[in-house]
Image (tube, rainbow, N blue to C red):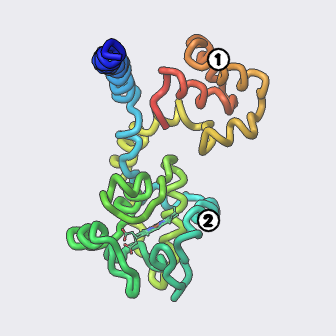
Amino acid sequence: MDDLGANKIFGAVLATALVILGLKQAAEMVYAPHKIEKPGYAIAVAEDTSGGGEAKADTPPDWGTVLPKADVAAGEQVSTKCASCHTFTNGGANGTGPNNWGVVGRQPGTHPGFAYSSAMQDFGKKTPAWDFDHLYMFLANPQSYVAGTKMSFVGLKKPEDRINLIAWLRQQSSSPVAIPAPNPKAEAAAAGAGAAQTAAGKPAPSDAAKVAETGKGEPAKGAPVAAAGGSATGTPGQTGSGAAAAPKTASTSPGAPPK
Ligand code: HEC
């Protein structure tokens, strides 16, 4: 009996030791992959800058140049993504978000009867109006442009979606904000920044899910490449003109800058 008792104690001590060892092992397993991940991130950043990727592509365009030729009807189409939370009609009701009739030129956080977040109210204090630039930046990624906003919308990644939408938004107003005169210099700079992005991203559909669904053109190629993932490093070379799947595939592999 005494032996049994001693054995129990001994067993408990042993088990504890094993648990401690196990934790150590687990900790090492957790930390090891982190060391591997870091260089990966470094590469991604390097490629972003060299490719003139997101940061530059998100420079607002020259509104005097792009607004007159924007596709307003396409912009209205984009606005359906907002319709679950916003009305855009004159005197429309507030919903999850405020009524946005006349939002272009309106001071942020000031539509009557809507309970804005303090983040949006603070933004309004330092921002006299939702002008084209502010809307362009906000709609790309609301949560990062107005940190703490309660607009839980992922954002519109494609610049032309935002431009078309803003062109349409501008018209949802009793007195639309004037379009500024074109500034060819600014447009040249913006177009230059966008060029790299266009090369990589123009035929890219709006989201990855769509590619999987439609797989237009070459479903046979698209599927296996996507499945092969990182191993098929060579395949993204097929960035052909119309290949809907190609830019997407490239972005999954370490190649292209993220959309
Ligand atoms: C999931 C709901 C939701 C969706 C979808 C959504 N919004 Fe919003 N939006 C909000 C909320 C909530 C606010 C108020 C934010 C705050 O108070 O922080 C807001 C605020 C705004 C504002 C600021 C209005 C003001 O008076 O200052 C603009 C502009 C705006 N949204 C535009 C859009 C556009 C354009 C879309 C579509 C591309 C969109 N939103 C999609 C919920 C949404």
Q: Which residue is mark 1?
A: 228
- Disc 1 residue lies near ligand 1 with CB under 8 A: no
Sequence-wise, which precedes: disc 2 or disc 1? 2
Tell me the quarter of the image containing the N terminus.
top left
Query: Ligand 1 closer than 8 Å to the CB at disc 2?
Result: no
Q: Is residue 74 among the parts visible in the rendering? A: yes
| Residue occupying the point 43% across, 52% down | 140
- Residue tagged by mark 2? 80
Residue 247 lies in quadrant: top right
Q: Residue at x 40, y 62 (%)?
A: 135
Residue found at x 54% / y 85%: 92
131 and 251: which one is in front? 251
Callouts 2 and 1 close, C-beta under 8 Å: no
Please indicate whether residue 181 sits to the left or right of residue 171 in the image: left
Which residue lies at the image location 49% right of the left edge and 21% below the top edge? 255
Q: Residues within 10 Å of mark 1 (few under 14, many from 20)?
A: few
| Amino acid on which disc 1 is placed | Ala
Query: Could you tell me residue 155's position as x and y percent?
Result: 47, 53
Pair 2/1: label in front: 1
Identify which amino acid the numbered label 2 is placed on.
Thr
Q: Where does residue 19 sit, x and y in percent of width and height? A: 33, 20
Secondary element at tag 2: helix
What separation in Å lies between label 2 and label 1 (alpha carbons)? 35 Å
